[in-house]
Image: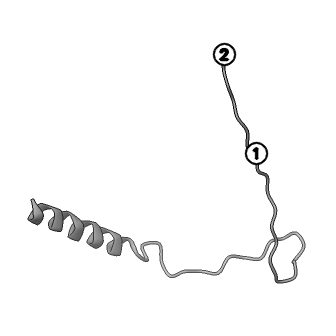
Amino acid sequence: MTQHLLLAAFALILATLAACGVDGAPTRPEPAREAIREPGVHISGEARFGVIKQL
């Protein structure tokens, strides 16, 4: 049992490392075409919460 678990963990690590860099070297994303914003922290989004009860 322990040998199977060790073999499975080794296979998972090997598969993960084999996938690193598959699509080439990392590239920096292009800046947005909208307005270039000043550096800093910008938070935006939407959040909802609630309780749903069906009778």
Q: In this view, does 6 lie to the left or right of 20?
A: left
Image spot of residue 28 (x, y percent): 64, 81
Q: Quadrant of residue 31?
A: bottom right
**Looking at the figure, which quarter contains the N terminus?**
bottom left
Secondary structure type for disc 1: loop
Q: Which mark is residue 48?
A: 1
Q: Residue at x 40, y 75 (%)?
A: 20
**Looking at the figure, which quarter contains the C terminus?**
top right
Q: Are marks 2 and 1 in contact (CB under 8 Å)?
A: no
20 and 2: which is toward the camera: 2
Characterize the local packing of mark 2: few (<14), some (14-19) or many (20 or more) Cα atoms within 10 angstroms.
few
Q: Which amino acid does label 1 sit on?
A: Arg
Q: Quadrant of residue 50?
A: top right
User: How many labels were placed on the picture?
Assistant: 2
Image spot of residue 11 (x, y percent): 22, 67
Image spot of residue 38 (x, y percent): 87, 82
For disc 2, the marked residue is: 55
Q: Residue at x 11, y 64 (%)?
A: 2
Image spot of residue 52 (x, y percent): 69, 30
Q: Is residue 4 left or right of residue 52?
A: left
Q: Residue 10 carries which label?
A: none
Q: Which amino acid does label 2 sit on?
A: Leu
Secondary structure type for disc 2: loop
Q: In this view, does 27 lie to the left or right of 13?
A: right
Q: How far is mark 2 from mark 1, CA to CA?
A: 22 Å
Q: Residue at x 87, y 69 (%)?
A: 34
- Mark closer to the chain start, 2 or 1: 1
The colour scheme applied to this rendered structure is one colour
Where 51 falls versus 21 (above or below)?
Answer: above
